[in-house]
Image (cartoon, grey):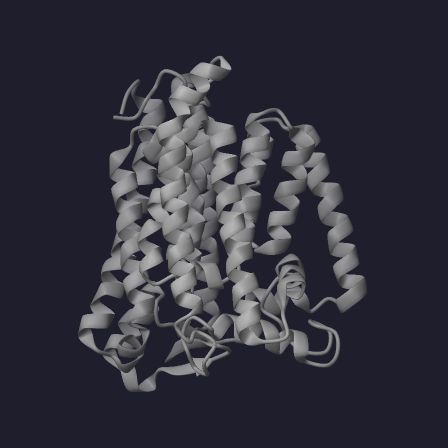
């Protein structure tokens, strides 16, 4: 049952002795969940992850390849990552692949803990613990900590938490930085207008304009097209909703294109346009419904369900669903779950577990084995189902007084 008294649960405020008594057990739970991640990362780093052609070392090899290529990224050679992500990669890069993987894992764990801390700051301990729980299945094959997506997730959650706390300038800077880390947070910007956070909007505009001008001055104007097209890739990635169906039908046509396994079926321009229009429609409708939610539901609609609907639309209506993209939905699913929506919580947990299995079985998946490809269909069906449930929640927030 979704709580309706205050929209979304807020942090507890008590005297210090009471706070210690209340938070000792949650703190121990958080410590245990973080400890599982530390153990998983240590095991990973001692497993030969730096050896050639290992799955979990692949992204780090690409990061090092970018930094070792002569010339200016974007201007002299294509790069699929936005500039803030590239800056973090340059910051953590070490002389060896294992060193880079170690620094990468430490940085991503720190950002994940930072995300949990931001959730605790903005919405309370239940949201923080729910977030860590939803990501726990991934410790069985710890791909998120050797990718770079926790950066954008942390910045987005910090933006929403700061907005909730009335820190508009901090919220605006975090929002703008999140877009320079990954493009997907653009779909969440309407919340600033709906909330009438004009100082935040001005900060986003100034920070974004300054960052864009600096980027163009440094690397030219080709970066946006390189990022949006994943360096000009033209096939459906095999974990996307259309891609897995093409792959099951003809696994022999699948090939590696720009660092990802893609089907032989060409992705035509009209298909890109249709996906873009569909995404815009869902995003617009989600924010429209959230902005008109009843008073008791407005906070949760704007801070959990509308962002969750938008990120799910970006995944479902995309030509590529890399496993780490699943991280985008987890903070908002955690907010919904912590507020009493158990169905959303269980669906997100199932998506987390299935995605972990998918990347662990990638070799069989690319070969077309049914036991590895059908779970991709199941995971994608869960994403669609979660999106339907979220849109249904948004529809009912105005129509009824309880859900």
**Which residue is most to the right?**
217
Expressed as whole percent of the image width and height from the top left, the position of residue 351 reads 30, 53
Expressed as whole percent of the image width and height from the top left, the position of residue 162 reads 59, 31
Above or below residue 36? Residue 189 is above
Above or below residue 189? Residue 139 is below
For residue 100, which quarter of the picture?
Answer: bottom right
User: In which quadrant is the N terminus drawn?
Assistant: top left
For residue 168, which quarter of the picture?
Answer: top right
Image point (53%, 49%), residue name? 110
Depth order, front residue of 393/85: 85
**Can I make out residue 231 in this image?**
no
In the rendered picture of this protein, how many numbered marks are placed on residues? Answer: 0
Depth order, front residue of 340/253: 340
Expressed as whole percent of the image width and height from the top left, the position of residue 42 reads 42, 62
**Which residue is most to the left?**
371
Image point (27%, 71%), residue name? 245
Depth order, front residue of 320/124: 124
């Amino acid at each position: 049952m979704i709580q309706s008294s205050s929209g979304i649960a807020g942090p507890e405020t008590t005297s210090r002795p009471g706070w210690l008594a209340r938070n000792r057990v949650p703190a121990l739970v958080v410590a245990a969940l973080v400890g599982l991640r530390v153990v998983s990362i240590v095991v990973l780093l001692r497993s030969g992850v730096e050896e050639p052609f290992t799955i979990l070392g692949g992204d780090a090899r690409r990061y090092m390849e970018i930094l070792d290529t002569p010339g200016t990224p974007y201007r002299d050679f294509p790069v699929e990552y936005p500039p803030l992500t590239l800056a973090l990669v340059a910051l953590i890069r070490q002389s060896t692949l294992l060193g880079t993987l170690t620094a990468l894992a430490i940085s991503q764990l720190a950002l994940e803990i930072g995300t949990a801390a931001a959730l605790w700051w903005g919405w309370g301990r239940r949201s923080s613990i729910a977030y860590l729980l939803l990501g726990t299945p991934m410790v069985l094959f710890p791909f998120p900590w050797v990718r770079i997506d926790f950066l954008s997730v942390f910045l987005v959650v910090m933006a929403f938490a700061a907005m909730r706390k009335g820190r508009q300038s901090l919220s605006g800077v975090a929002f703008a930085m999140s877009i320079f880390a990954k493009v997907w947070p653009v779909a969440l910007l309407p919340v600033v207008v709906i909330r009438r956070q004009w100082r935040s909007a001005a900060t986003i505009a100034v920070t974004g304009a300054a960052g864009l001008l600096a980027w163009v001055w440094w690397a030219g104007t080709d970066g946006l097209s390189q990022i949006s097209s994943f360096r000009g890739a033209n096939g459906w990635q095999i974990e996307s909703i259309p891609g897995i169906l093409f792959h099951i039908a003809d696994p022999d046509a699948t090939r590696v294109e720009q660092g990802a396994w893609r089907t032989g079926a060409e992705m035509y321009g009209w298909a890109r346009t249709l996906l873009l229009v569909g995404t815009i429609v869902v995003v617009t409708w989600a924010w429209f419904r959230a902005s008109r939610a009843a008073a008791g539901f407005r906070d949760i609609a704007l801070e959990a369900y509308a962002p969750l609907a938008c990120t799910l639309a970006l995944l479902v209506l995309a030509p590529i669903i890399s496993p780490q993209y699943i991280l985008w939905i987890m903070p908002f699913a955690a907010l919904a779950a912590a507020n009493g929506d158990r169905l959303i919580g269980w669906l997100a947990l199932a998506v987390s577990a299935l995605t972990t299995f998918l990347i662990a079985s990638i070799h069989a998946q690319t070969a077309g084995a049914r036991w590895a490809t059908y779970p991709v269909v199941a995971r994608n069906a869960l994403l669609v189902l979660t999106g339907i449930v979220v849109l249904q929640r948004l529809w009912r927030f105005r129509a009824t007084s309880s859900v």
